[in-house]
Image (cartoon, rainbow, N blue to C red):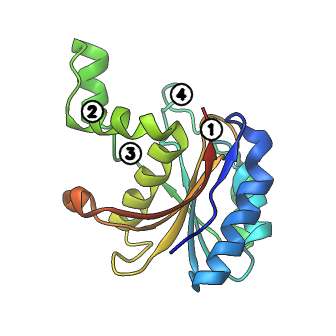
Amino acid sequence: MEEKITYFSKPGPENTGEVLRIARARAEALGIKKIVVASTTGETAVKAMEVFRGFRVVIVSHFTGCSEPNIQEFLEENKRAVEGSGGVILTTTHAFAGLSRAMCKKFGTHLFEEVVANTLRIFGHGMKVACEIAIMAADAGLVRTDEDIIAIGGSSRGVDTAIVLRPVNSPDFFDLSVKEILCKPHF
């Protein structure tokens, strides 16, 4: 089997439109109906909802307090737009953070989840994000673990990575199967 991978010259939001286009084309080719997209402020989420009309779209946001205590970065107007377009927004603790990040912040000790996150980052930050949000969506019951999905993540703002994968629940992490890399930064 031979498929095309698109490599971007650098990570970042300038790749968002092309990532969404590539992901939609591959979803149509494979008959995939569920798309999971990372979005911090909701700007990417709104764009994804436009591109993926007719698909089941799950947007995974940062947890409240990620940037600073009691602050939710996902803008209310973007939340209304996503939900008004039929999208679902998942806001929960990041699968590769949680208490492990607390241990790292407090004691400088990296636990399992931090090691997994840093290992996935060798393929790019967006790859880590795409795998993580797929697990989060599965744990929330928003995607099934017996169907392929497309997961889309980024390095900061916007998105720059898209993959086809079979999600798993977090206790089954080592059964996660990344089937195709559709696009990612080349660095």
Q: Residues within 10 Å of mark 2 (few under 14, many from 20)?
A: few
Looking at the image, tell me whether mark 3 or mark 1 is earlier in sequence order.
3
What residue appears at the point 70 percent right and 36 percent down from the top-left corner? 12
Q: Residue furthest bottom?
A: 31
Q: Provide the secondary structure element on which disc 4 rests.
A: loop
Front position among marks 2 and 1: 1
Q: Amino acid at mark 4?
A: Ser
Look at mark 1 in the image and give the residue it sits on.
Answer: 186
Find residue 86 and report its image quarter: bottom right
Do the residues under discs 2 and 1 have CB atoms within 8 angstroms? Answer: no
Look at mark 2 in the image and give the residue it sits on.
Answer: 115
Q: Nearer the viewer, residue 42 or 132?
A: 132
Count numbered badges in the picture: 4
| Separation (CA) of disc 4 from disc 1 | 28 Å
Look at mark 3 in the image and give the residue it sits on.
Answer: 93
| Separation (CA) of disc 2 from disc 4 | 21 Å
Find residue 154 and report its image quarter: top right
Residue 157 percent across, percent down from the top left? 68, 37
| Separation (CA) of disc 3 from disc 1 | 29 Å
Q: Residues within 10 Å of mark 1 (few under 14, many from 20)?
A: few
